[in-house]
Image: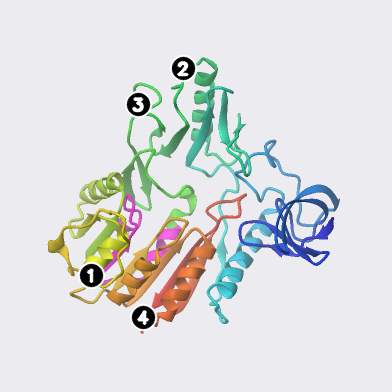
Amino acid sequence: MEVTIERILPGGYGLAHAEGKTVMVSLAAPGDRLRVQIDRERGTVCFASIIEIIEPSPQRIEPPCPYFGRCGGCDFQQMTYQAQLDAKVEIIKDCLHRIAKLENIPPFRITAAPDEWHYRSRAQWQYDADEKRLGYYEGGSQRVCDVAECAVLAPELQQELENLRRQMQEDSLPADARYFRAVAGDEGVVTSASVRSPTVREGTPRQIRRTINGETYTLDAESFFQTNEHLLPELIAAAVGDASGEIAIELYSGVGLFTLPLARRFKRVIAVEDNKDAARFARRNLANASLTNTEVETADVATWLDLECGGLTPLSPRTVRTTPMKKRRQAGARQIDFLLLDPPRTGAQSRVIYGILQLKPKRICYVSCDPATLARDLRKIIAGGYSLDSLAAFDMFPQTHHVETIAHLTGP
């Protein structure tokens, strides 16, 4: 089948129409004329891969990575960097129009990464001990693509990958390891394996410090932390903005990336994080910064909101960790000036959105790494009486279709 790519869709696919079908082509560029093969079909929607580039788009370049097309990581290397940025803006707009049903989207811009390459300060490398493969999963499979050099890794992590590969060749890596996680900090790299042993090598520190915008964060390789530190000062500034007041709530607070800046602007902050290790690091980071006005609750976000709202949100039947009953309605007893949420890629549960609406914060900031789930959740929040004031996008993940978006909303 011969197709011409019209634009890039959420998920990174190129959109084309041919023979009465909607064709979604992986690793395409806008304007490409291609010969493709259909890999699978769902009704009139086909998913396809490129057989031949008949006429390349002016936006197409030669991918510099030798693993491009096999490794499932970077799916935008075939486009110029400006084309990547333009595609991400259009992906956000598409999701807000199509999913959130927004007619008038506030004008926004995307902040480019200072470095299109060598930016990743966190990584997870899959390990196949039988085949002696260490790298990333191949696209659409669980087979490990053996990677000797990764062009988006920070130099410290590239060196750590090489160290691990040497150990692999020497048969000194844990045979039962499935993957290795690594994070770079101010004073080196810490690595953990998916086995009981806490570190790959004896003497490797389990914890590491990262200094961002004057704030110091302690974390380990298992902690979630934004991977592109070069953009973090601008990301934090866009999320927190000029917010200040009496009470702020942060949901999915992690090790405290936004918690510390919020604690400097509000008299009282309540941070909620389900992961007990991340919550422990957040408390430590606040204490090291001498910030005593913040409570970090180790709790499932939806259940915590239910308790704060007096049991009004619908509970799921599954067992979840909750905050003590004595803390019920602590936040809800007063007006919430600002609420920030930074959920995982899957977005916020309906119960979470419902709980936020019950709390009625004056302002909401939603930090998202997936435009589709952001649009889905914004539709519910806006239906609850909030208005979308502003948007900002950040290219935290160059060479991929992923993009970070920040939305600010004001209550009725």
Residue indicated by mark 4: 411
Q: CA distance from mark 4 to mark 1?
A: 22 Å
Q: Earlier in the sequence, mark 4 or mark 1?
A: 1
Between the residue at mark 1 and the residue at mark 3, the CA separation in whole angstroms equals: 41 Å
**Residue 202, magenta (yes or no):** no
Q: Is residue 78 above or below residue 380?
A: above
Q: Residue at label 3?
A: 197
Whole-percent x, y for residue 157 in the image: 50, 34
Nearest-to-viewer mark from 2 and 1: 1
Q: Between marks 2 and 4, how big is the CA–CA gap? A: 57 Å
Q: Residue furthest bottom?
A: 412
Q: Residue furthest left?
A: 326
Q: Are marks 3 and 2 in contact (CB under 8 Å)?
A: no
Q: Which residue is at 45% across, 78% downward?
A: 389
Quarter of the image holding residue 313? bottom left
Tag 1: residue type?
Answer: Gly
Q: Which residues are magenta?
A: 234-259
For label 1, the residue is 311
In the rendered image, the vertical position of residue 111 relative to residue 125, given as above or below: below
Crowd tier of the residue under label 3, counting other residues whose Cα lies within 10 Å: few below 14, some 14–19, many 20 or above: few
Identity, as a three-letter code, of the amino acid under mark 3: Ser
Q: Earlier in the sequence, mark 3 or mark 2?
A: 2
Residue 198: quadrant of the picture: top left
| Residue to which mark 2 is pinned | 172
Which of the two labelled residues, at mark 4 and mark 3, occupies the earlier sequence position?
Answer: 3
Dot 4 alpha-carbon crowd within 10 angstroms: few under 14, some 14 to 19, many 20 or more: some
Marks 2 and 4, the one that precedes in the sequence: 2
Q: Nearer the viewer, mark 4 or mark 3?
A: 3
